[in-house]
Image (cartoon, rainbow, N blue to C red):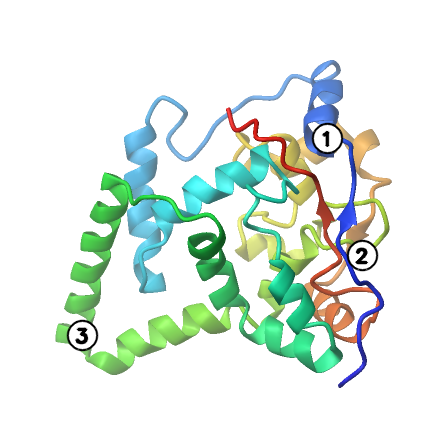
Amino acid sequence: MGAKVSRTDFEWVHTEEPHATRRKIILAIHEIAHNLAFGHNRALHNRIFGFFANLPIGIPISISFRKYHLEHHRYQGDEVIDVDLPTLLEAKLFCTTGGKLLWVLLQPFFYSLRPLVVRPKPPTPLELVNLIIQLFFDAVVVKVFGFKVLGYLLIGSLLSMGMHPVAGHFISEHYMFRKGFETYSYYGPLNWITFNVGYHNEHHDFPAVPGSRLPEVKRIASEFYDDLPQHHSWSAVLYDFIMDPDIGPYARIKRKHYGLES
């Protein structure tokens, strides 16, 4: 459990993230229908639906996640902007087999708190609305069902992001399991309960396409996706991440930040 990872730094590259390039090439070949939960022209409807979907989680994350996640898409691998990247402190502290196991168990805290530490942003009015709605829902749960039920929701949310097969997608998506490749898809059955989040290359290439349509993206552009490295088991991803000395928090591709945020 004390074996150290072989990497001592992130994988630095000087090329742009691959999804913008591949998206341009594919659009020269295929026409994609863009659609979201309620369509691009109904932004408020999408936010309200986000508040509703947030309720069982127990803590308000819908709006906060969105504002950081959109930057992750636009600036993937940017050393300053992409808060999906582990910090240097994380990479140094959790560089052994036992350390990586602990890091996976604590992943919900790193995933949710890292943006607030490395790239804090002032709260928006919609975040306040999200907070009020969530606190009201939590209060109703406590009043009607008691604290144990609220605890069940909160603990369930934490466990589902840590040492859990479905949580393997957090690591499978962008950790470099094969040198030079920074995004990986998974096409297995767990996509049925995760809204096709496993179709991650397709998602980054076409972020405006809803999850239900991502298998269609892969089908009509199969010549671009079939030969890319892919995962076949999220459980195997967790095991390999912890046990393989060539993989760890350092196994991410990073890009220098040039200050172009708009």
Q: Where is residue 118 in the image (x, y as percent from the top left)?
A: 49, 52
Amino acid type indicated by mark 1: Glu
Q: As drawn, which residue projects farthest toward the left? A: 143
Is disc 3 in contact with disc 1, using a CB cutoff of under 8 Å?
Answer: no
Residue 168 visible? The answer is no
Is disc 1 in contact with disc 2, using a CB cutoff of under 8 Å?
Answer: no
Q: Which mark is residue 142?
A: 3
Q: Is residue 190 above or below residue 207?
A: below
Q: Quadrant of residue 14?
A: top right
Q: Which residue is drawn at 20% across and 61% down?
A: 135
Please tell me whether mark 2 sits on a helix, a strand or a loop: loop
Left or right position of 37 against 137: right
Q: Which mark is residue 16?
A: 1
Q: Position of residue 64 (x, y in %)?
A: 38, 47
Q: Where is residue 54 in the image (x, y as percent from the top left)?
A: 34, 54
Q: Residues within 10 Å of mark 3 (few under 14, many from 20)?
A: some
Q: Which residue is drawn at 74% across and 68% down?
A: 241
Please tell me whether mark 3 sits on a helix, a strand or a loop: helix
Q: As drawn, which residue projects farthest toward the bottom? A: 1
Left or right position of 228 against 167: right
Q: First in sequence, mark 1 or 2: give its number.
A: 1
Q: First in sequence, mark 3 or 1: give its number.
A: 1
